[in-house]
Image (cartoon, rainbow, N blue to C red):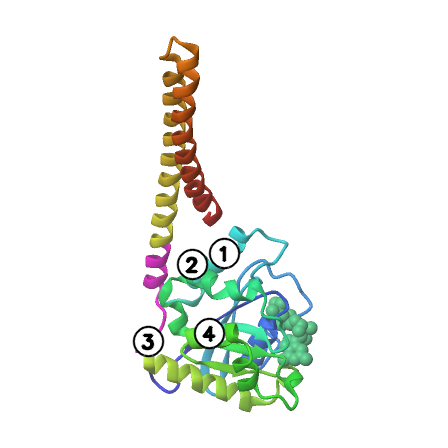
């Protein structure tokens, strides 16, 4: 990549993580309105940073309660077209003082669902609220939390700390851009729209497969019930009817349980 080649970045993370503030720090100006707390759409801003055109796409917060999970995913996923021909880097934002809850643990999976399994190769963890670290070391924070350490490892060990309260400190920005450049060199390029389209197609195939599985489960359940009724009707003697039917139902019952477990799995994934 040319030293002054344009750079496309996409910022992801939970609401209030510091996404818009970080975007402003990168661009060196108040490009994104911080007062507007509810960002329901992705938006792109650009500026010349150290003689280089940098474009940043800010996204709605993951797990934002104002939008459904699907709405957020759709909005973020399609925003890849805002950074044509594709983002060079995904910045996954976490405040240093966050609690690494179940939500945070789901973030890499959600990003992989939206952009495909390759996406973490193009990602950097961006810790905000660096001013709150004080004497503490970011490495200690990462190593002290096994889940967080795993996440950083998934991103090739790449992370950076921002103090957005000190946005005039350009050193932190230069440091981030250097890490992004190193990552681009290692990846021989950027995350392309083609990769996004492959991920999208894969997601659709997965959904189709789940839909077919659910239909199959319903079909088999109905077939079992139907066979059970036929079986019951096929005996004239009431005692025989009850004995045989109970043993038959026993088998059917276990089959149905297995089916329901399969069905449950498919529904919960959806
Ligand atoms: N102290 C401190 N506050 C920050 C930092 N980054 C963001 N904030 C504050 O955190 C709040 C949420 O930031 P914002 O960028 O709007 O989060 P977003 O919802 O992820 O876009 C705002 O009040 C910011 O001023 C930081 O590095 N240090
Ligand atoms: Mg915001």
Report the residue marked by disc 1: 73
- The circle on residue 189 is 3
Q: Is residue 249 above or below residue 117?
A: above
Residue 133 image offset from top left, x and y in percent: 64, 85
Of the numbered discs 4 and 2, the one sitting upstream in the chain is: 2
| SS category of the residue bearing label 4 | helix
Of the numbered discs 1 and 3, the one sitting upstream in the chain is: 1
Span highlighted in magenta in the image: 188-200
Q: Are the residues tagged 1 and 2 within 8 Å (C-beta)?
A: yes
Residue 214 image offset from top left, x and y in percent: 40, 38
126 lies left or right of 98: left
Identity of the residue drawn at 42% across and 73% down: 154
Q: Is residue 256 above or below residue 62?
A: above
Of the numbered discs 1 and 2, the one sitting upstream in the chain is: 1
Q: Nearer the viewer, mark 4 or mark 1?
A: 4
Of the numbered discs 2 and 3, the one sitting upstream in the chain is: 2
Q: CA distance from mark 2 to mark 3?
A: 21 Å
Report the residue marked by disc 4: 150
| SS category of the residue bearing label 3 | loop
Identity of the residue drawn at 55% across and 76% down: 145
Report the residue marked by disc 2: 113
Q: Nearer the viewer, mark 2 or mark 3?
A: 2
Q: CA distance from mark 4 to mark 2?
A: 18 Å
Membership of 81 in magenta stretch: no
């Amino acid at each position: 990549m040319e030293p002054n080649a344009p750079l496309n970045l996409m910022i992801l993370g939970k609401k209030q993580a510091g996404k818009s503030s970080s975007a402003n720090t990168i661009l060196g100006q108040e490009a994104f309105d911080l007062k507007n707390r509810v960002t329901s759409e992705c938006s792109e801003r650009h500026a010349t940073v150290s003689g280089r055109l940098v474009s940043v796409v800010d996204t709605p917060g993951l797990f934002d309660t104002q939008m459904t999970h699907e709405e957020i995913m759709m909005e973020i996923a399609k925003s890849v077209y805002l950074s044509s021909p594709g983002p060079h880097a995904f910045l996954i934002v976490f405040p240093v003082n966050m609690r690494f809850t179940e939500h945070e643990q789901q973030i890499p999976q959600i990003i992989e669902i939206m952009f495909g399994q390759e996406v973490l190769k193009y990602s950097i963890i961006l810790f905000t609220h660096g001013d709150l670290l004080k004497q503490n070391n970011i490495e200690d924070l990462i190593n002290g939390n096994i889940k967080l350490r795993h996440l950083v490892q998934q991103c090739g060990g790449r992370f950076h700390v921002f103090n957005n309260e000190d946005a005039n400190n350009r050193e932190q920005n230069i440091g981030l851009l250097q890490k992004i450049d190193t990552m681009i060199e290692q990846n021989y390029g950027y995350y392309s729209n083609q990769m996004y389209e492959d991920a999208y197609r894969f997601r659709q195939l997965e959904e189709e497969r789940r839909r077919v599985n659910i239909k199959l489960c319903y079909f088999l359940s109905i077939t079992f019930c139907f066979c059970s009724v036929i079986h019951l009707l096929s005996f004239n003697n009431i005692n025989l009817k009850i004995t045989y039917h109970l043993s038959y139902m026993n088998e059917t019952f276990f089959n149905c349980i297995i089916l329901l477990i399969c069905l449950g799995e498919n529904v919960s994934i959806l």
